[in-house]
Protein backbone atom coordinates (compact mmCIF):
# COMPACT_ATOMS: atom_id res chain seq x y z
CA UNK A 1 0.00 0.00 0.00
CA UNK A 2 1.40 3.40 -0.92
CA UNK A 3 1.67 6.22 1.57
CA UNK A 4 -1.13 8.08 -0.19
CA UNK A 5 -3.45 5.05 -0.03
CA UNK A 6 -2.59 4.60 3.65
CA UNK A 7 -3.43 8.21 4.48
CA UNK A 8 -6.70 7.99 2.52
CA UNK A 9 -7.72 4.83 4.40
CA UNK A 10 -6.93 6.51 7.72
CA UNK A 11 -8.99 9.55 6.78
CA UNK A 12 -11.91 7.33 5.71
CA UNK A 13 -11.71 5.51 9.07
CA UNK A 14 -11.57 8.87 10.88
CA UNK A 15 -14.75 9.96 9.12
CA UNK A 16 -16.37 6.59 9.89
CA UNK A 17 -15.50 7.08 13.58
CA UNK A 18 -17.07 10.55 13.34
CA UNK A 19 -13.90 12.23 14.60
CA UNK A 20 -12.89 15.75 13.74
CA UNK A 21 -9.18 16.30 13.13
CA UNK A 22 -8.82 18.12 16.49
CA UNK A 23 -10.55 15.22 18.30
CA UNK A 24 -8.31 12.73 16.54
CA UNK A 25 -5.25 14.81 17.38
CA UNK A 26 -6.16 14.73 21.11
CA UNK A 27 -6.40 10.93 21.01
CA UNK A 28 -3.15 10.73 19.03
CA UNK A 29 -1.24 12.92 21.49
CA UNK A 30 -2.67 10.95 24.44
CA UNK A 31 -1.07 7.82 22.93
CA UNK A 32 2.32 9.50 22.55
CA UNK A 33 2.03 11.07 19.11
CA UNK A 34 4.31 14.06 18.62
CA UNK A 35 2.89 15.77 15.54
CA UNK A 36 0.61 18.77 15.72
CA UNK A 37 -2.94 18.99 14.38
CA UNK A 38 -1.69 20.60 11.15
CA UNK A 39 0.66 17.64 10.55
CA UNK A 40 -2.21 15.20 11.03
CA UNK A 41 -4.55 17.14 8.77
CA UNK A 42 -1.85 17.38 6.11
CA UNK A 43 -1.10 13.67 6.38
CA UNK A 44 -4.77 12.71 6.15
CA UNK A 45 -5.01 14.79 2.97
CA UNK A 46 -1.88 13.15 1.54
CA UNK A 47 0.15 16.36 1.65
CA UNK A 48 2.54 15.82 4.59
CA UNK A 49 4.48 12.63 5.35
CA UNK A 50 4.51 11.05 8.81
CA UNK A 51 7.19 8.63 9.92
CA UNK A 52 6.15 5.01 10.39
CA UNK A 53 5.94 5.18 14.18
CA UNK A 54 3.72 8.27 14.07
CA UNK A 55 1.50 6.55 11.47
CA UNK A 56 1.15 3.60 13.84
CA UNK A 57 0.22 5.87 16.76
CA UNK A 58 -2.34 7.59 14.54
CA UNK A 59 -3.74 4.23 13.38
CA UNK A 60 -4.05 3.10 17.01
CA UNK A 61 -5.91 6.30 17.93
CA UNK A 62 -8.34 5.77 15.04
CA UNK A 63 -8.81 2.06 15.84
CA UNK A 64 -9.59 2.85 19.48
CA UNK A 65 -12.13 5.48 18.42
CA UNK A 66 -13.79 2.98 16.06
CA UNK A 67 -13.89 0.38 18.84
CA UNK A 68 -15.40 2.89 21.28
CA UNK A 69 -18.01 3.95 18.74
CA UNK A 70 -19.15 0.48 17.75
CA UNK A 71 -18.90 -1.31 21.10
CA UNK A 72 -22.49 -0.31 21.88
CA UNK A 73 -23.63 -2.24 18.78
CA UNK A 74 -21.91 -5.50 19.74
CA UNK A 75 -24.20 -8.49 20.20
CA UNK A 76 -23.60 -10.40 23.44
CA UNK A 77 -22.69 -14.08 23.24
CA UNK A 78 -25.26 -16.71 24.19
CA UNK A 79 -22.78 -18.53 26.42
CA UNK A 80 -22.23 -16.73 29.71
CA UNK A 81 -18.67 -16.17 30.92
CA UNK A 82 -17.29 -18.76 33.38
CA UNK A 83 -18.28 -18.30 37.00
CA UNK A 84 -15.82 -17.32 39.72
CA UNK A 85 -15.49 -20.91 41.03
CA UNK A 86 -14.08 -22.10 37.70
CA UNK A 87 -11.66 -19.19 37.54
CA UNK A 88 -10.50 -19.84 41.12
CA UNK A 89 -9.86 -23.54 40.34
CA UNK A 90 -7.83 -22.57 37.27
CA UNK A 91 -5.84 -20.05 39.33
CA UNK A 92 -5.00 -22.74 41.91
CA UNK A 93 -3.98 -25.16 39.17
CA UNK A 94 -1.69 -22.59 37.56
CA UNK A 95 -0.18 -21.62 40.93
CA UNK A 96 0.51 -25.31 41.64
CA UNK A 97 2.24 -25.74 38.30
CA UNK A 98 4.37 -22.65 38.91
CA UNK A 99 5.41 -23.87 42.35
CA UNK A 100 6.57 -27.21 40.92
CA UNK A 101 9.11 -25.47 38.71
CA UNK A 102 10.50 -26.71 35.41
CA UNK A 103 10.91 -30.45 34.78
CA UNK A 104 14.17 -32.13 35.75
CA UNK A 105 16.38 -32.41 32.65
CA UNK A 106 17.55 -35.82 33.88
CA UNK A 107 14.02 -37.17 33.62
CA UNK A 108 13.57 -37.60 37.38
CA UNK A 109 10.46 -36.71 39.33
CA UNK A 110 9.60 -33.07 39.87
CA UNK A 111 10.89 -31.53 43.05
CA UNK A 112 8.88 -28.61 44.41
CA UNK A 113 10.77 -25.38 44.65
CA UNK A 114 11.75 -24.46 48.18
CA UNK A 115 12.07 -20.72 47.60
CA UNK A 116 15.17 -18.62 46.88
CA UNK A 117 18.47 -20.38 47.37
Image (cartoon, rainbow, N blue to C red):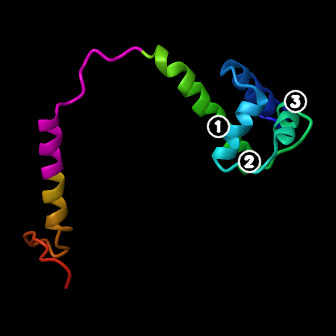
In the image, what residue occupies the spot 77% across and 33% down?
22
- What percent of the width, then of the height, locates residue 5? 81, 30
Q: Is residue 72 left or right of residue 34?
A: left
- What percent of the width, then of the height, locates residue 18? 69, 20
Helix, strand or loop at mark 3 = loop
Q: Is residue 100 left or right of residue 1?
A: left
For label 3, count other residues whose C-alpha is less than 10 Å away and answer few (under 14), some (14-19) or many (20+): some
- Which residue was labeled with disc 3? 45
In the image, what residue occupies the spot 53% across and 19% down?
70
2 or 3: tag closer to the N-terminus: 3
- Which residue was labeled with disc 2? 54
- What percent of the width, then of the height, locates residue 40? 81, 38
For label 1, count other residues whose C-alpha is less than 10 Å away and answer few (under 14), some (14-19) or many (20+): many
Asked where in the image residue 25 lies, by quadrant, the reply is top right
Residue 61 is marked as 1
Helix, strand or loop at mark 2 = helix
Amino acid sequence: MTSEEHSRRMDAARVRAELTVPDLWLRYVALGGTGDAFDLDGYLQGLVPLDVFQQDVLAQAINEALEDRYRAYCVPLSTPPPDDAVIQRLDRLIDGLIEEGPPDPGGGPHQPRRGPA
